[in-house]
Amino acid sequence: MADEAARRAVAELPLLRTAAGPRDREGWASRLKEEYRALIQYVENNKRADNDWFRLESNAEGTRWFGRCWYIHELLKYEFGIEFEPWLLSTPTLSVGPAPPVARELGDGCLATRLLRAVFR
């Protein structure tokens, strides 16, 4: 059931077609526009579904993203900061290894950390 909902959510987003990183100046500008379009569409879809759970912004180059995420469980709001580099999340890897680097305010074992691991699986 959750996999089907995730597939539906992803199907509503525009595809990212430009394969470029921050070192490719011309291609990166196009890729960054695509990422912003997809992010804006995702946020709009979430707001329509009353499922608003994060705020993100990036630096001027679009190489570091940061913001706040939250989760409400049993009427308690768990909120935490997040910071990541999106081009690292989409870099293909040839071997099984640790998850991409995501900076968190809270330590291991807390609910926020478990939620982040579930989101970025």
Image (cartoon, helix red, strand yellow):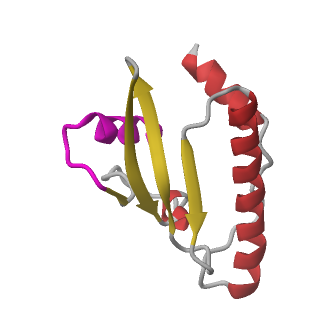
Quadrant in which the N terminus is drawn: top right
Instruction: Report the side of 93 relative to 51 (left or right).
Output: left
On screen, residue 66 above or below 74: below
**Residue drawn at point x = 55 percent, y = 58 percent:** 90
Residue 121 horizontal side relative to residue 18, left or right: left
The part of the image, by quadrant, that contains residue 60 is: bottom right
In the picture shown, does residue 117 fall above or below 16? Answer: above
Please determine whether, in this image, residue 119 is positioned above or below residue 97. above
Q: Which residues are drawn in magenta? A: 105-121
Frontmost residue, 77 versus 34 = 77
Quarter holding residue 109:
top left
Residue displayed at 74% across by 56% down: 16
Q: Residue furthest top?
A: 1
Q: Residue 15 location in percent, x, y?
A: 78, 50
Instruction: Look at 71% across and 43% down and name the residue there.
Output: 42
Comparing 110 with 6, the one in front is 110
For the C terminus, the image quarter is top left
Task: Kindly identify the residue that appears in the image at 76 percent across and 84 percent down.
Answer: 26
Q: Position of residue 71 (x, y in %)?
A: 44, 33
Residue 7's place in the image compared with 34, above or below, is: above
Q: Is residue 90 magenta?
A: no
Q: Position of residue 64 (x, y in %)?
A: 51, 71
